[in-house]
Amino acid sequence: MKPEWLDNLNIDVSLAKKLTFNPYYGELEAGLGETTCLVGKKFLDLASNNYLGLAGDPRVLAAARLALDENGLSLCGTPIATGANRLYNTLCRSLERFLGMERVLLYPSCYQANLGLFRALAGKEDVTLVDQFAHASLLQGIAATGCKVMPFLHNNMEHLQKLLGRCGRYRRILVVSESVFSTRGTICPLADMQALAEEFDALPIIDDSHGIGVLGVRGRGILEHEHVENFSGIYTASLGKALAGQGGMVAASAEIIEYLSYSNEALIYSTALTPPVIGGLLEVLRIIEEEFSQKSKRLTANRSQLLRSATEAGLKTIAGDAPIVGVQQGSDRATLILTRELFKRGVFSTPFLPPSVPPNQGVVRLIANAGLSEDQMCRASHALKDAAEASRRDTE
Amino acid sequence: MKENDLKNKILTIFQTISRRTEPIRMETNLREEMDFDSLTTLMAMNELDDAFEIEINEEDFIDVVTAADVVRLLRENYLGLSAESDAKEMANET
């Protein structure tokens, strides 16, 4: 017999049923490559965060295999116990050099890094000012501290400054944002944010998940893009997007990292990143050092073509500078319909519905990664135009 | 504070933080018509705190649906103004 409490665990999937299309948890038949296979068909991948197209790069796979052979599948322990072997520490040092930050800690995911970070840093006596479109992991991490929360208007430094002026009575002031906003492609003015944080004796925290390996002339992320040297705050990022691996990181001064390494439950109680993942990540960093310029050109060209096609197709796009094209569809229905029409035409995209976005602001996100060829981009453009037309017909 | 000043001040705050360009009216449903989510609501509360030098309890905001509800909430619970005194004020003005 079904327990009564299960009745309260309902998810409304009626719209997906009505549209005979559920875009979530689609089963890929293999890894990411030139094409992605689902339901026995080949798809163009405009959905994943594989920005540089390195997830299936043979050199990365070979490095992962070598690390597996030499270190085993897992170190079966947290970093504080058996999890931090030489390979693990090599990745920490490599990321420190890559970013120009003093120290780095590795986490099982950036979500976990963000959740754990705030609990270790803030409490009821503190205040956090956060961009209104910041990622759920940042918001949930902040909410878990019980501190006063002051959202500021998206990328609006004037509003941030005004709010900072009201924070004198709090013990600690944190200013939090993302480098690249994941559904919009807009970029945080970090240099200005850091200047304001310094003026008001606040600690800036930036999540560079969609910026690392993407922004800057050498792919070093938001710090390079914004010409921020000697960043005085805390930097977090995912290692599973452009870096094509898994896990997350926190970078900061030696004092902060020393404190976090003994006080942050999300780190202390989580099994360390595994050797094959670390081996692959080290190779990705090497490839970025050598080939970023060429991959970045491809990424930029693909993004421009996609944006042009979306505009020509009459779709309403969000004009960010990062290689993300957000198509604003509004209602849940219109968002799912465009995703479905793209899917029918062999394009895999990502729909964002509330609570991931505000109500009635559904977005279909398209990322044209550097691994897509000119021919594939042409196919994607045609599919986008056809799908937009079909979507309009169905939505009317 | 006069009723109209109170209303205008509140509407200006909501208009500033709203992502929509349509003008907000007293009967506008903030969530359904202006797409206010939890963060926008929190932002609105912070702005109201600052503008009126009060500290709004989050629980008081749970039942707020329209801008008119906010006017009522502030007038009755935070600013010590009553609808009756407003009516008298308006009568004196006319």
Image: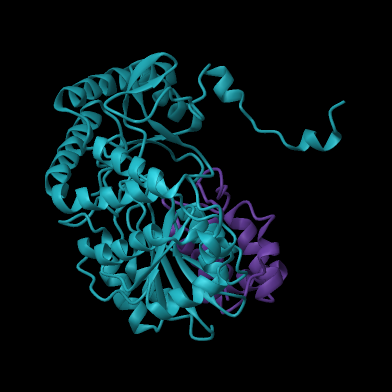
Chain colours: A cyan, B purple
Q: Position of residue A336 (x, y in %)?
A: 46, 27
Q: Position of residue A143 (x, y in %)?
A: 59, 63
Q: Is residue B55 left or right of residue A286?
A: right
The image quarter containing residue B41 is bottom right
Q: Is residue A301 left or right of residue A350?
A: left
Q: Position of residue A180 (x, y in %)?
A: 32, 53
Residue lying at the far front of the rendered structure: A70
Q: Is residue A316 above or below residue A199?
A: above
Along the viewing direction, whichever of B11 and A304 lies nearer the viewer: A304
The residue at 31%/60% (across/down) is A188
Q: How many numbered dots are placed on residues in this image?
A: 0
The residue at 29%/54% (across/down) is A212
Q: Is residue B51 visible?
A: no
Q: Quadrant of the C terminus of chain B?
A: bottom right
Along the viewing direction, whichever of A75 and B34 lies nearer the viewer: A75
Q: Is residue A12 visible?
A: yes
The residue at 23%/58% (across/down) is A220
Q: Quadrant of the N terminus of chain B?
A: bottom right
The residue at 56%/64% (across/down) is A268
